[in-house]
Image (cartoon, rainbow, N blue to C red):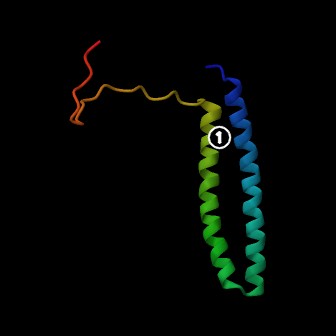
Amino acid sequence: MARGRSGTVGIGFLAVWLVFWAAAILTALWYMGDAALRGEPGAVVFLLVWLGGAGFGLWNGARRLVRLMMEGEAPPKPIRDHTWEDGIDPPPPR
């Protein structure tokens, strides 16, 4: 399947975003080490929680990037027929 321009732009944006996100994680690690050396347990705990969430986000972003590069964007799911249960008469058949 050929990738369109929007797919290529999306892959590029996600790759750049992941680089910046990884840099933010490294910066937080640096500040966490500084806070630990200065004896500030509140800052260390906060940064540990933030790093946990940021690591999860980085992991999900990397998985999405791989999926976009390998498979492309998934087409939308088809709308299925369903039974009307809202008290209104169903539309007439076509």
Residue under label 1, please give it. 65
Residue 68: percent from left, percent from top: 62, 34
Indicate left or right for 35 with 53 as reference: right
Q: On the rendered image, what quadrant is the N terminus found in? A: top right
Q: On the rendered image, what quadrant is the C terminus found in? A: top left
- Res. 6 image quadrant: top right
Q: Residue at x 71, y 85 (%)?
A: 40
Q: Residue at x 77, y 83 (%)?
A: 37
The residue lying toward the viewer, choosing from 91 and 61, is 91
Indicate left or right for 79 with 42 as reference: left
Q: Residue at x 67, y 78 (%)?
A: 44
- Res. 78 image quadrant: top left
In this rendering, the answer to whether 23 lies above or below 43 is: above
In this rendering, the answer to whether 82 lies above or below 24 is: above
Callout 1 secondary element: helix
Residue 60: percent from left, percent from top: 59, 49
Q: Label 1 neighbourhood size at 10 Å, few (<14), some (14-19), many (20+)? A: many
The number of discs equals: 1
Residue reaching furthest to the front: 88
